[in-house]
Amino acid sequence: MIEGYESCLGRRAIVNRREALDNKKNHKLGMADSWTNGQSFEMSPLSEQSVGESRTLRGGVAKSDITINDPEITVNDPLYAKALVLDDGKTRLAIVTMDAVAIGGICEIPDSFLPRLRKRIEEELHIPGRHVLVNASHTHPPEPILCNEDEQVERTFDAVRRAVDGMTEVTIGSGTGKEDRISMNRNLRMKDGSHWTIRHSNPSPPDDDVVGLGPVDPEIGILRVDRADRVDGPPLAVVYNFACHFLFGDPTGKVTANIPGVASRVLEDYWAGQTMAFFVQGACGDIIDVGFKDFMVPREVETLGQKLGQSTLKAVRAISTATSTLEVLSQTVLFPRRTDSAECIRAKEKERDELVESLRFMTLNFELFQSLHPHGTGGSVSPLAAPYHYLRDTDRMRSDYRSMDELNRTNVARYLENIRTMERLARIQDEIATYQRHQAINAESGESTIEAEIQVLRIADCVLIGAPLEVLTEVSLNVKKASPFAQTFLAAFSNGYMHYGPPVGDYAKGGYEVIECFLAPEWQEVFEQTVGELLSRLEGQKNQ
Ligand SMILES: [Zn+2]
């Protein structure tokens, strides 16, 4: 690895690795660490500080407000960093959820946040850094929304510290719920086999060209943590994992935790504030809420959040809990960076030039088009005048009006064709800029690969997989299908941020996620293979 390598994404991975190495030296963890290909490592699930006499399962929760404090900015509802700490007497782990866009990379949380947070947790709370999963809800209100960088670390750490301080004996159970009313795949399948992503930065395609939608995963993955002395009482914690982009929280731009904020309140209010609800964002790379591009109704997230909350609540109530053991594995892998950016840019530029060339030979301007459009495309038999004028024409063996109709239809169609071209140009310009951005990120890194942390937590009968990118649904469904665990949940947006992770088959089909991606298609194989190996090892340990 090149020293001084300053890519915002790579630097964090390196810091993590160095910290983990330091951790190995300093804490002399009880289990041998193994290295693979000299490039990846696994943290031991053992921490000497957490090895207790018994295997009593204990857990604690706490949260900190991490909202910006600025008189100029209106807050609709506060943003939180929430911490759930679990300890089975052998393994101690923490799940931290944050109302934020991402853990580093593209938002107010800097790349230094995760290493700083984990370092403090390791040093002061004796939880190995790699046992801490930090997930961002990927909420998108206009920034800034968070407290400053030092406060982010301080307050998040403080939530974890208080969760540790408040640990009590617990029981755990897991299960799944279903919510298929609020989300959809935003990748439209087009007649010509390509993909077109529904976005606000460019128009949707012509209606007639759309033939289908990409896959959606309506599963809510749930972990229920009960106080051991109150198994019939309110849960101590509910962790729920669901996949959906939350892009517009408040129509007036107020700071909000968006749909997960509403859903968590549904759960917390139901149990009169005695339960803490943790939203863990899933593989929502290509998933949006169903009202994302509706312009005929006001935007509001309350109903969508309530639906998610109610569906989660229904499933949580059906989960019974028992004592459980915990296991954590973490591995650093090398994802290949894409090498085709220049080629993709050239292809897009060629397409753009051809489209520009086609913008010729049109007679209408916008005002004339508006006047003629209802006539040119309407079903009326007499679009230009009252029917009797057309009848007079017929009686006089003439076709003056019908000829004008014909000409108008042709000109309107030509104008519309140019409008469609303009829509495609707007999209292509956006695509070229995105390719260029990722080309620059990869060039700046000077590396052909990037380190990524894959983390797996087994808690009760479920496994939670932490991945530092916006994984698309198909990849997540593959991982779930291949898993030896019946309940496998994917916490995308965890422990870092590397933009989109689309499936290999999508690269040739276009769509925003494929373009907004700096990884080569082979990343998917590395990811799925690593997850598969880690899960097999967890399964083996469980059966020992
Ligand atoms: Zn996103």
Image (tube, rainbow, N blue to C red):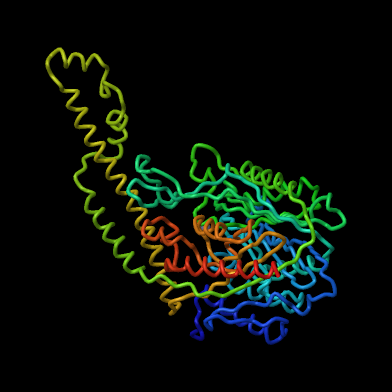
Q: Assign the C terminus to one quadrant of the image.
A: bottom right
Q: Quadrant of residue 325?
A: bottom right
Q: In the image, what residue occupies the spot 74% across and 61% down?
A: 63
Q: Is residue 442 left or right of residue 122?
A: left
Q: Is residue 513 above or below residue 219?
A: below
Percent position of residue 176, x then y: 66, 50
Q: In the image, what residue occupies the spot 60% across and 68% down?
A: 536
Q: How many marks?
A: 0
Percent position of residue 151, x then y: 69, 69
Q: Is residue 184 above or below residue 157?
A: above
Residue 345 visible in the shown view: yes
Q: Is residue 446 left or right of residue 28?
A: left
Between 255 and 409, the one lying in front of the other is 409
Pick out the residue farthest to the left: 397
Percent position of residue 94, x then y: 71, 67
Q: Is residue 397 above or below residue 272?
A: above
Pick out the residue farthest to the right: 229
Q: In the image, what residue occupies the spot 79% across and 68% down?
A: 164
Q: In the image, what residue occupies the spot 72% across and 49% down?
A: 316
Percent position of residue 208, x then y: 35, 40
Residue 144 visible in the shown view: no
Q: Is residue 89 above or below residue 182?
A: below
Between 514 and 392, the one lying in front of the other is 514
